[in-house]
Amino acid sequence: WVLSDFEVGMPLGRGKFGHVYVAREKRAVPHTNEEKRWVLLDFESNQIVALKVLFKSQLKQSQVEHQLRREVEIQSHLRHPNILRLYGYFYDQTRVYLILEYAAKGELYKELQRWKHFDERRSATYIASLARALIYLHGKHVIHRDIKPENLLIGVQGELKIADFGWSVHTFNRRRTMCGTLDYLPPEMVEKSEHDYHVDIWSLGILCYEFLHGVPPFEEKEHSKTYRRILNVDLKFPLKPYVSAAAKDLISQCADGREKFCEPASSPEGTRATVDCTE
Ligand SMILES: CC(C)CCNC(=O)Cn1cc(-c2ccc3c(-c4nc5ccccc5[nH]4)n[nH]c3c2)cn1
């Protein structure tokens, strides 16, 4: 693809390395050209997409080219209804263009700001979708590591879509780098110790709490106090809004999910992140 293959519309958002626009591919696929049809199999012509434009200069300046390549490599192989699709990419002299799935109902965090908090039915629907996406990701030895409302989008039928893989890694090369937004970091990442797929289970609990209460559980004005509360798993449930015992239990289990969730299948090279969470 080249930029002139697309009609580019309004900006959808802006990130550190560039902007995202709604766009539509101009070409109708020539039905006679089977080879061309195959190339576009994954990507119906005239489909609305989100076109993310990244400036090479900024990627170079921030030394994130390798991270971008890793994200593209990871996301281009993912196929799940609750994970935003990356259909393809192209580049020109100065920019890299990512052809992403368009999420018609926009950013989840804006919905959360609008409603202050979600009821248990809506929260449970989102958390169940996220849990299914995580089982899929962990089954492919991918840890997301940065699950938070700002990385979630809503599809045309109200379905949740995980949109960002800025910090995801294949678990074969477990990383010690600090990453992710503070509020969602589990103790092992705050302590900068080795971490594995449990970090995503922890974030699922934090997200469930924030959906139900409107704020994450360990939020404090000072970072040092947030750190301390995370390390102590200082989980408090205010009286309002009402949260059921079942929801509190789920959140508590995510917070100390070590022994309660499925144990990873062990393997000759030690514990891998193959989550044997069979139903
Ligand atoms: C390297 C590559 C694999 C990374 C792929 N992931 C990203 O680039 C993360 N990302 C996704 C987006 C993004 C932002 C907004 C949207 C939208 C969208 N739909 C909207 C509807 C109404 C209002 C706002 C909307 N934003 N659909 N798809 C999007 C995709 C921006 N960055």
Image (cartoon, rainbow, N blue to C red):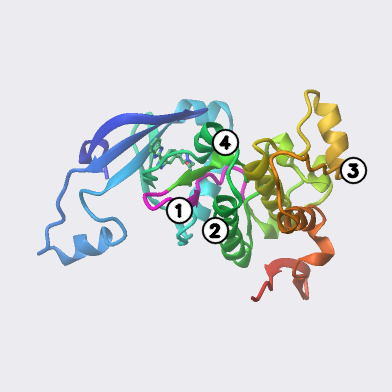
**Which residue is disc 1 drawn over?**
159
Packing grade of label 4 (10 A; few <14, some 14-19, many >=20) is: some
Please, what is the three-letter code of the amino acid marked with disc 4? Answer: Val
Q: Type of residue at label 3?
A: Asn
- For marks 1 and 2, the one nearer the N-term is 2
Above-or-below relation of 182 to 144:
above
Tell me the CA gap for discs 1 and 2.
Answer: 8 Å
Above/below status of 45 relative to 50? below
Residue found at x 69% / y 69%: 275
Front tag of 4 and 2: 2
Quick one: which residue is furthest to the left in this view? 32
Quadrant in which residue 43 is drawn: bottom left
Q: Can residue 94 be seen in this view?
A: yes
Seen at 38% across and 28% down, the residue is 94
Q: Can residue 146 be seen in this view?
A: no
Q: Mark 4 points at which residue?
A: 64
Tell me whether circle 3 and circle 1 mark residues in contact (CB < 8 Å): no
Q: Which residue is drawn at 57% across and 42% down?
A: 166
- Mark 1: amino acid: Glu
Identify the secondary structure beneath mark 4.
loop
Q: Which of marks 3 and 1 is nearer the N terminus?
A: 1
Give the residues drawn in magenta, as a range: 155-168
Labels 4 & 3 near each other (Cβ < 8 A): no
Query: On the image, numbered disc 3 is attached to which residue?
Result: 232
- Give the residue number, with chain letter if any, for mark 2: 129
